[in-house]
Structure formats: C-alpha cells, structure tokens
Image: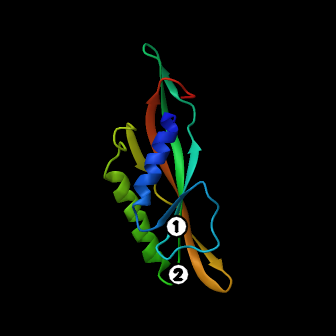
Amino acid sequence: MTIKETILTALHARLSALPATALRGEVLPERVPTDGLLILRDGEPGEPEVTLSPLRYHYQHRAEFEAVVQGEACDAAFDELTASIGAAIAADRTLGGLCDWVEAEAPRPVDLPIEGAASLKAALIPVVLHYSTADPLG
C-alpha cells in the first residue's frame, strides 16, 4: 500500500470510531443515519515541494469530508458532529506517525430542504495532510 493510501485509510479508521457512520468514496445514501454521516473523499495531493539529497516529495494533500445530518435539531447535531471530527483529529495530528501534520479547515455548512422529509444540514470539511515520500507513485 502507498503512503497516501495508508494515510487515508488511517484517517478513515480514526473517524470510523465516531458515532456517525463513516464511509469512504461512497455516494450519498438515500437515508442519513440518525447520528449523522461522514464520507471521506480522497482529494488531491497537489504539486509537491521537492528536496534533493535525499530525494523527497513533500505533499500538502487536500482530502475532504462530506458531513451530513438530518432531523429536527440538525443545527445542534451538526455542531456536535464537527466538534467530534475536530477532537478526533486533534487527538493525534500525525496519525500514529504516518503524517507530519493533519489539520481540518472550517466547514461551510448549507441547509438543504427535502420535500416531505426533515431538512439536511451538510458541509464539505477540507482536511490537509502534510506528508513526505521518496517516490510520487509510492
């Protein structure tokens, strides 16, 4: 497994411990679980900075979570979900030494009315993964 895949798998595992259902690369299901839903999107590693001797590629990989809650008190549920994401990331910002640093950016929530059902509150939450590798394909 590549460093990038190992890091994304570790990040997904970290957030799978939260009460919300955590998926990776899935489409939004028809029903949002009562505790909320997180979908990890692999994102873009971007252009690395390169150092020589030894050759290293330094990435600031931008992955993102789709965070979705539904129900009567979706504002409070969304706030609780985003706070739990922040706490899970802050508990180990290196993902057990796999990354140099992991940081989430502030979400930009939107309210989505659903005809005949409770509205959704959703946001994309960018997560920047700082890591280095000896090979951009490895």
Residue 111 against residue 124 in the figure, above or below? below
Q: Nearer the viewer, residue 52 or 25?
A: 25
Tell me which corner region of the image, top left, top right, bottom left or bottom right, holds residue 84. Answer: bottom left
Q: Position of residue 86 (x, y in %)?
A: 38, 58
Query: Which of marks 2 and 1 precedes in the sequence?
Result: 1
- Given the image, on which type of amino acid does mark 2 rest? Gly
Residue that carries the numbered disc 1 in the rendered image: 37
User: For mark 2, what is the residue?
Assistant: 71
- Residue 129: where, in percent of width, then height? 46, 42
Residue at x-position 46% and y-position 15%: 52
Residue furthest to the top:
53
Q: Identify the image's colour scheme: rainbow, by chain, secondary structure or one colour.
A: rainbow
Q: Secondary structure at mark 2?
A: loop
Where is 133 relative to 129, above or below?
above
Type of the residue with mark 1: Leu
The residue under the point 37% across, 52% down is 89
Q: Residues within 10 Å of mark 1 (few under 14, many from 20)?
A: many
Q: Residue at x 47, y 76 (%)?
A: 75
